[in-house]
Image (tube, rainbow, N blue to C red):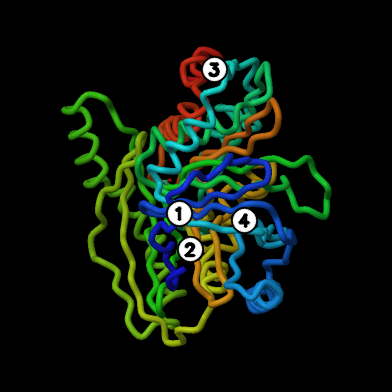
């Protein structure tokens, strides 16, 4: 594997079956990093970045020494710094071309699978509650305490039969040609609590950090508008988003925070003055590509990513205060949602993206997550609609978008 980036795909032969409950997938650009089997599975505390980086290094070095190989770990770091990160060092890792992997997955999926039939929808936080939290947050802005807070909801979708996880992943690949697809076997909290196992699966549009040869890259997103099938409406939405002072502010707060953290760690840091627009299959976002050269090129990617996480794209500003308010306003833990997911190796390389546009899949249950950045100019109803639009990535992949909207008509 070349420093910090997924290497050119090396494997062109038949991949064999991908089993989401035990194999890991991380897609970046045209390459997929795919694991087979678990050599080691462990959790690590994340509230001390130095300790996290050195303990992970020990695990990777031990694996590399016993296998006379280069070692890679896949990991998920939760939103809350008091919880534990989950890591898997696989028995085998390969890189594969994305199109080829998508074809293998579709071929694997041709067996007579029944469609996912939605039985019920349960909001952990319904529309009235969510909009009230936005109003409560706005009162905090008025007091001058906060600049920004990200508020979120979780929706539980119960199905008649166990979910066809391979089918959901195949759909994510087919429907979202860009973005960072991931599928990681994980526990809802951490391996210690022996929670029912599940799979965290989705396609994140947001790169938190990639490290390559002492260079770092990040692509924070903040400020959003849903896409529209009609080209003229779509053009109007793009210009509305680009010109929106509220969205520009939401975005600027993220960049300021990242510049404060990365600036002292870099000999040069390039942050363009104006954002770009980035599209996913369902949303437009304000987007900025950040590039920097590290003062200490040997700093491991995991340490940099854990230092940046959570940015104000997922938490708020000031971070600690926003975090406290999220805890009370949302009223339920986020767990792995709005954490970070990615890979790292024993040479300090790695790539981490934020855990959004995803779901946690367990047997007949899919728990989906969506959040929205709230600033003083936010409108509660528009923010709710933004979170509904963000759910569409997973609703499309589960093939229940229509059924979901019928079931929740009264909330729109
Ligand atoms: C929290 C989410 O999106 C973040 C990433 C991009 C744009 C965002 C926004 O405009 O609010 C959010 O900060 C989500 O998709 O659940």
- The local secondary structure at tag 2 comes to strand
Residue linked to disc 3: 408
Q: Is residue 288 left or right of residue 110?
A: left
Crowdedness near tag 1: few (<14), some (14–19) or many (≥20) residues, C-alpha within 10 Å? few
Q: Which residue is mark 1?
A: 11
Nearest the viewer among 235 and 342 is 342
Q: Quadrant of residue 165?
A: top right
As drawn, the label of residue 103 is none
Q: Residue at x 64, y 79 (%)?
A: 50
Residue bearing the label numbered 4 = 76
Q: Label 3's element?
A: loop
Q: How many angstroms separate mark 4 from mark 1 (CA)?
A: 26 Å
- Residue 274 is situated, as x and y percent measured from the top left of the image, at 23, 60
Circle 4 or circle 3, nearest the eye = 4
> 63 or 122: nearer the eye?
63
Element at label 4 = strand
Horizontal side of 234 relative to 174 (left or right) equals left
Residue denoted by label 2 = 351
Q: Residue 253: where, in percent of width, then height?
A: 40, 60
């Amino acid at each position: 594997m070349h420093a910090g980036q997924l290497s050119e795909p090396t494997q062109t032969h038949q991949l064999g079956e991908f089993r989401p409950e035990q194999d890991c997938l991380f897609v970046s650009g045209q390459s997929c990093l795919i694991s087979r089997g678990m050599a080691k599975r462990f959790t690590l505390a994340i509230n001390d970045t130095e300790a996290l980086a050195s303990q992970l290094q020990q695990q990777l070095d031990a694996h590399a020494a016993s296998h006379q190989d280069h070692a890679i770990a896949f990991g998920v770091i939760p939103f809350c710094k008091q919880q534990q990160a989950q890591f898997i060092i696989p028995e085998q890792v390969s890189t594969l071309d994305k199109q080829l992997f998508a074809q293998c997955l579709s071929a694997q999926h041709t067996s007579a699978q029944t469609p996912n039939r939605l039985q019920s929808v349960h909001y952990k936080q319904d529309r009235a509650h969510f909009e009230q939290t936005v109003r409560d947050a706005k009162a905090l802005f008025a007091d001058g305490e906060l600049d920004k807070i990200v508020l979120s909801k979780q929706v539980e979708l119960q199905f008649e039969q166990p979910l066809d996880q391979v089918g959901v992943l195949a759909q994510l690949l087919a429907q979202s040609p860009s973005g960072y697809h991931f599928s990681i076997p994980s526990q809802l909290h951490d391996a210690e609590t022996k929670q029912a196992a599940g799979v965290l699966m989705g396609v994140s549009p947001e790169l938190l950090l990639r490290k390559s040869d002492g260079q770092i890259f990040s692509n924070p997103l903040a400020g959003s508008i849903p896409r529209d099938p009609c080209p003229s409406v779509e053009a109007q939405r793009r210009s509305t988003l680009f010109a929106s002072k509220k969205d520009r502010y939401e975005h600027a707060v993220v960049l300021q925070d990242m510049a404060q953290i990365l600036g002292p760690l870099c000999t040069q840091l390039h942050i363009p003055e104006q954002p770009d627009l980035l599209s996913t299959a369902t949303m437009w976002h304000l987007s900025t590509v950040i590039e920097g050269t590290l003062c200490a090129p040997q700093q491991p990617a995991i340490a940099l990513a854990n230092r940046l996480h959570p940015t104000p794209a997922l938490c708020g500003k000031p971070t600690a205060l926003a975090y406290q308010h999220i805890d009370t306003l949302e009223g339920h833990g986020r767990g792995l949602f709005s954490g970070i997911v990615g890979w790292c190796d024993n040479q300090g390389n790695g790539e981490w993206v934020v855990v959004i546009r995803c779901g946690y899949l367990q047997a007949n249950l899919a728990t989906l997550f969506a959040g929205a950045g709230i600033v003083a100019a936010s409108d509660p109803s528009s923010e709710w609609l933004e979170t509904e639009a963000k759910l569409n990535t997973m609703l499309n992949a589960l093939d229940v978008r229509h059924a979901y909207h019928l079931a929740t008509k009264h909330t729109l």
